[in-house]
Amino acid sequence: MTTSTQQATRLATGTWEIDPVHSNIGFEVKHLGISVFRGGFARFAGRIEVADGAVSAVEGTIDPDSIDVTDETLAGHLRSPDFFDVDDHPEIEFASTAIEPAGEGFRLLGDLTIRGITRPVELEVKLEGAGVGPDGSERIAFSAEGVIDRNDYGMTWNADLGNGNTALGGEVRLVLAAEAVRK
């Protein structure tokens, strides 16, 4: 069951489509036990439903073949069966299951499906603003963060470095910035 959030800014009721030009979906993972590696995706879509002035549902998809990292060899490895397995799993999906007030925003609970494996995920979401674009379109913007364990989705590849560290951490931080346009 999805519930509405209580927010200081009252949002216009309706369906809001993610603007992929002014949004980004990123991830962060520990690399070599000493640094944080960042990447993202170039192609994604999503919809935010607003009822009674607050977000009531969120759905989205990501094309994992659009993995965006600075090295094409690494991108190829991330597309392989070791990670996203894009040939057999061409889409990552998210669907909200509940929305709860939390802090300055809300907690977005949902089901995240990667590689055909669905697990619950929790995102902390903050309304960044609402306004009108130069073309007259109504817009809202949110930021969101959450953590998943990549191993839960069958992405278990790793390399032991022999010093107590591995090439990659299991914990992956999701970092999103979404701007949406009212339809």
Image (cartoon, rainbow, N blue to C red):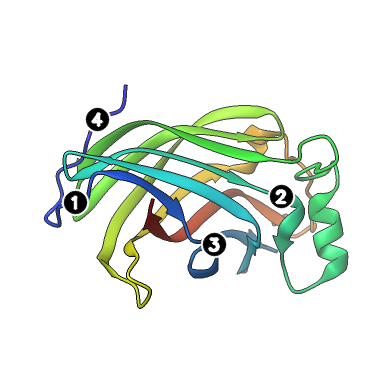
> Residue 64 — which label?
2
In the displayed structure, does residue 28 sit left or right of residue 114? left
Q: Nearer the viewer, residue 143 or 179?
A: 179
Q: Nearer the viewer, residue 42 or 18?
A: 18
Residue occupied by mark 4: 3
Q: CA distance from mark 1 to mark 2?
A: 31 Å
Residue occupied by mark 3: 20
Residue 167 appears anywhere in the view: no
Q: Amino acid at mark 1?
A: Gly
> Residue 166 — which label?
none
Say which element carries label 3.
Answer: helix
Say which element carries label 1.
Answer: loop
Look at the numbered discs 4 and 1 and tell me whether their residues touch, using CB distance below 8 Å. no
Look at the numbered discs 4 and 3 and tell me whether their residues touch, using CB distance below 8 Å. no
In the displayed structure, does residue 134 sit left or right of residue 9? right
Q: CA distance from mark 2 to mark 4?
A: 29 Å
Q: CA distance from mark 2 to mark 3?
A: 15 Å
Q: Nearer the viewer, mark 1 or mark 2?
A: 2
Pick whichever of labels 4 and 3 is earlier in the sequence. 4
Q: Nearer the viewer, mark 2 or mark 3?
A: 3
Pick whichever of labels 2 and 3 is earlier in the sequence. 3
Q: Amino acid at mark 2?
A: Pro
Q: Amino acid at mark 3?
A: Pro
Quarter residue 145 falls in: bottom left
Say which element carries label 4.
Answer: loop
Pick whichever of labels 4 and 1 is earlier in the sequence. 4
Q: Nearer the viewer, mark 4 or mark 3?
A: 3
* Label 2 CA crowd tier, 10 Å (few <14, some 14–19, many 20+): many
- The percent coordinates of residue 133 (x first, y second) are 34, 73
Q: CA distance from mark 4 to mark 3?
A: 26 Å
In the displayed structure, does residue 22 sit left or right of residue 133? right
Residue 115 appears anywhere in the view: yes
